[in-house]
Image (cartoon, rainbow, N blue to C red):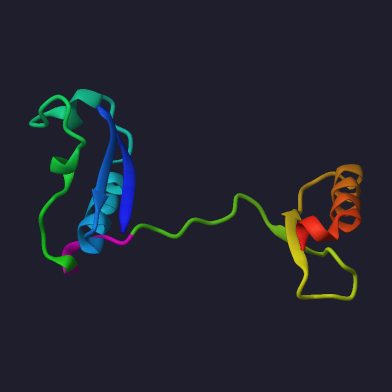
Amino acid sequence: MKINFPTPGGVGEVQGDHLQARKCYVVAIRRGQKRNPDEDRQGVPPGKKGKEMVEEGAPGEMETPAKVQPAEELLNIEVIPGSPDKTRRIGSHLGGKTREEIISCLRRNPDIFS
């Protein structure tokens, strides 16, 4: 397992240890965006990939980040009418003409979208 994550000094990397990668992810989510990016660099020598950013703690202490939700409701569209297993989702707030053009494109190209 390998996970890359952004750091102020470039891209950090954790590989080979699933638990360590999860800890790193949770720390990154928990920190969010800080006003002073130099706060993240304290104690990290130049040229390091950010592996020092991982906080130690018991696995039960980790917070689970919230699941990502769609920005809007989605509509299921049958790419091949009558085939409910061949569907794609499109935004429900699309205008009538735009929605029809997208549905038409999906149905004209079922080999690509199904």
Q: Is 30 situated above or below 33? A: below
Q: Nearer the viewer, residue 87 or 11?
A: 11
The magenta region covers 60-64
Instruction: Give 64 or 102, whichever is nearer the viewer.
Output: 102
Q: Position of residue 28 (x, y in %)?
A: 28, 45
Q: In the image, residue 104 lies at what x, y percent?
A: 91, 52
**Is the stretch drawn in magenta largely helix, strand or loop?**
loop
Q: Is residue 54 above or below residue 113?
A: above
Task: Describe residue 53's horizontal placement relative to residue 98 as left or right.
Answer: left
Task: Residue 90: give x, y in percent of width and height.
Answer: 75, 54
Q: Does residue 110 lie above or below 6 as drawn?
A: below
In the rendered image, the quadrant that contains the N terminus is bottom left
Q: Residue at x 27, y 58 (%)?
A: 22
Q: Residue at x 77, y 63 (%)?
A: 114
The spot of residue 50 in percent (x, y) is 20, 37
In the image as oriented, which residue stretches furthest toward the left? 43
Residue ID at (86%, 55%)? 109
Magenta span includes 63: yes
Q: Is residue 28 inside the magenta stretch?
A: no
For the point 13% across and 50% down, which residue is it?
Answer: 55
Q: Is residue 107 left or right of residue 5?
A: right
